[in-house]
Image (cartoon, rainbow, N blue to C red):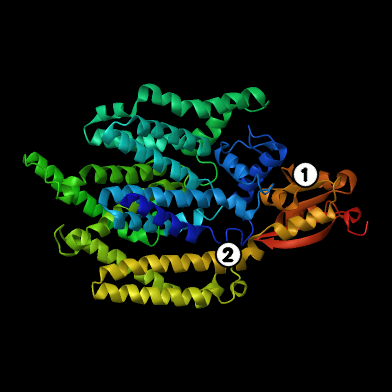
């Protein structure tokens, strides 16, 4: 086995140890997790694998790719449980770590490959999303696979790599729509234009490659439109692709949103990305100067050897950030496909560490590196104040966490002091080890210590199960402000009520229906339906939820 292959297996094993244990140690939390799990559950139970449904109605927000995978993985169990709903993301995270390690090992050696995988997996959003029922880790795996396949096809002209490029984009499109092919195409076309080598794109075999890209998603769209009444692909694309990008549907944020969100989402390694970008930029400038001077590139010179790779990574990182910056719809998890490029840039920084520290690459990279390490140490050190700050946070139940805040404070203080001490003595390998160990320790404490303790306050299960018990089959169960978590945990389909008038009519219709509603929304209705009373109540997240019914709806009826 090659060194790259061994690095990939090591990276996969490390990622599995981080991502797989405890996947089901807490319930599915709204809004996204129970929605996606319910879509996969209905696909599995109803046998309709062609078109996603939720609560019995067509679900148009996302294509079926992720739901197919989740439902297929749940076939042996017969249901989509908490761990099963998160398994597609965890497996994608493991495969992504292995893929990044394999490519980085071929570029800069096995240590850099393992470092890149560790950096990627221990970044906050990479770790968190790979342990939740979200689509973005699978999307990132497929877009990363497409970009690496494109690079290999351009470098070697291989037909297999070119086919992999188009097929990975087709898979990504089936997972999250047009963004699945737009991101890789934008990156690879921009890279070749900046390299002044647009003819290299012909090595991707576009003559027949477009067919591999278009056939799976378009074939599914045509089949769904023909066989399922009420499904309009044009209307879905206009609302969920064009509408999200141009207008924003749920998460409108300003253009500068990612300028600070990135540093939170990829912590702690995001603080080293400016130094890594500076190093890559200096490498590109040196290569350009040498080329203009007519000097023959020396294979032993990293700046010349890595020119193509560094340009590719910079275009990959900034291209994806720019794409989502231009979009009106912005969420932190959207930029996850840029994280592999950032992780590779940081791994390149560490692989050149001795030369950077010695000043061979100029003063800017080492200054940015010192600043980034200093800031990360201070952030971890700030965790020491968590036991004091947590009880003062609004809507935060510190008592539910028990000793978890103390444990996080101890880890944060230890890691922060260690990083600052190592920085003072310029022990850079120790700094890297402490960054990785600190991220692992902090995120594992979150996943295994904090999330299970927050579950009671975050989960809709208790109230949903109470509603199912008080509303046996045949009893109407409705909800004002529909949320899929109550469908998932009640095991019942809910009547979706759009306004206060429909909620009042629902309660008055036959006197036996039960209504799930927020307390604030219930106040103006309560006086109009005096016979109704509150049968159960629970605070779910920041919402005070009620189960309301008439006397005929009580357990004693």
Left-right relation of 297 to 149: left
Where in the figure is residue 484, as x and y percent of width and height? 67, 48
What is the CA distance from the residue labelled 2 to the residue labelled 1? 38 Å
Query: Looking at the image, can residue 181 be seen?
Result: yes
Residue positioned 36% across, 66% down in the render: 435
Q: Which mark is residue 479?
A: none
**Residue furthest out toward the front:** 1
Residue 56 in the image: x percent, y percent? 72, 38
Q: Quadrant of the C terminus?
A: bottom right
Residue located 39% across and 73% down the image: 415
- Where is residue 501, by image quadrant? top right
From the viewer's perspective, is 239 left or right of 106? right
Circle 1 SS class: helix
Q: Identify the residue shown where x is 31% and y is 38%.
A: 151
Q: Looking at this rendering, what residue extends furthest in the right direction?
A: 557
Q: Position of residue 76 (x, y in %)?
A: 66, 47
Foreground: disc 2 or disc 1:
2
Residue identifier under label 2:
451
Query: Which badge, 2 or 1, comes first in the chain's sequence?
Result: 2
Task: Decide: is 76 above or below 58.
Answer: below
| Residue indicated by mark 1 | 501
């Amino acid at each position: 086995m090659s060194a790259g292959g061994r690095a990939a297996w090591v990276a996969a094993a490390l990622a599995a140890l981080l991502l797989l244990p405890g996947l089901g140690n807490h319930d599915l939390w709204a809004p996204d997790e129970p929605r996606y799990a319910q879509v996969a559950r209905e696909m599995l139970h109803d046998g309709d694998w062609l078109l996603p449904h939720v609560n019995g109605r067509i679900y148009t927000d996302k294509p079926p790719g992720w739901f197919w995978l989740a439902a297929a993985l749940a076939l042996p169990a017969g249901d989509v449980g908490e761990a099963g709903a998160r398994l597609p993301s965890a497996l994608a995270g493991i495969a992504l770590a292995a893929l990044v390690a394999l490519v980085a090992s071929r570029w800069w050696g096995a240590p850099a490959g393992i470092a890149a995988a560790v950096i990627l997996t221990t970044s906050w959003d990479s770790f968190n999303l790979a342990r939740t029922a979200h689509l973005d880790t699978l999307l990132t795996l497929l877009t990363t696979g497409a970009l690496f396949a494109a690079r290999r096809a351009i470098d070697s002209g291989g037909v297999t790599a070119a086919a992999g490029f188009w097929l990975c984009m087709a898979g990504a499109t089936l997972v999250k729509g047009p963004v699945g092919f737009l991101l890789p195409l934008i990156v690879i076309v921009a890279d070749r234009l900046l390299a002044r080598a647009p003819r290299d794109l012909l090595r991707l075999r576009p003559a027949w490659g477009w067919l591999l890209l278009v056939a799976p998603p378009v074939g599914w769209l045509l089949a769904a439109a023909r066989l399922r009444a009420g499904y309009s692909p044009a209307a879905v694309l206009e609302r969920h692709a064009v509408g999200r990008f141009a207008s924003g549907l749920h998460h409108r944020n300003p253009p500068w949103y990612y300028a600070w969100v990135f540093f939170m989402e990829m912590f702690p390694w995001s603080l080293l990305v400016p130094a890594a970008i500076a190093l890559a930029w200096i490498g590109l400038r040196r290569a350009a100067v040498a080329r203009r001077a007519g000097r023959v590139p020396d294979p032993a010179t990293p700046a010349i050897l890595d020119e193509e790779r560094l340009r590719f990574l910079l275009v990959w990182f900034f291209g994806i950030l720019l794409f989502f910056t231009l979009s009106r719809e912005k969420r932190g998890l959207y930029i996850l496909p840029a994280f592999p490029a950032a992780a590779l840039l940081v791994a390149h920084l560490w692989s050149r560490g001795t030369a950077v520290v010695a000043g061979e690459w100029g003063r800017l990279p080492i200054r940015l590196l010192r600043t980034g390490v200093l800031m990360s140490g201070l952030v971890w050190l700030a965790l020491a104040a968590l036991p004091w700050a947590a009880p003062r946070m609004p809507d935060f139940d510190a008592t539910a966490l028990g000793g978890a805040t103390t444990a996080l404070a101890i880890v944060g203080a230890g890691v922060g002091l260690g990083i600052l001490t190592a920085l003072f003595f310029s022990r850079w390998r120790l700094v890297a080890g402490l960054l990785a160990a600190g991220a692992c320790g902090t995120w594992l404490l979150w996943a295994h210590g904090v999330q299970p303790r927050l579950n009671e306050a975050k989960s809709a299960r208790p109230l949903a199960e109470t509603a199912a018990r008080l509303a046996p089959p045949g009893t109407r169960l409705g909800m004002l402000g529909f949320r899929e978590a109550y469908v998932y945990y009640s095991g019942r389909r809910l009547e979706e009520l759009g306004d206060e008038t429909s909620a009042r009519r629902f309660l008055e219709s036959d006197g036996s229906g039960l209504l799930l509603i927020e307390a604030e929304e219930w106040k103006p209705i309560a006086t109009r339906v005096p016979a109704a009373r509150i049968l159960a109540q629970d605070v779910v997240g920041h919402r005070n939820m009620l189960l309301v019914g008439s006397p005929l709806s009580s357990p004693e009826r």
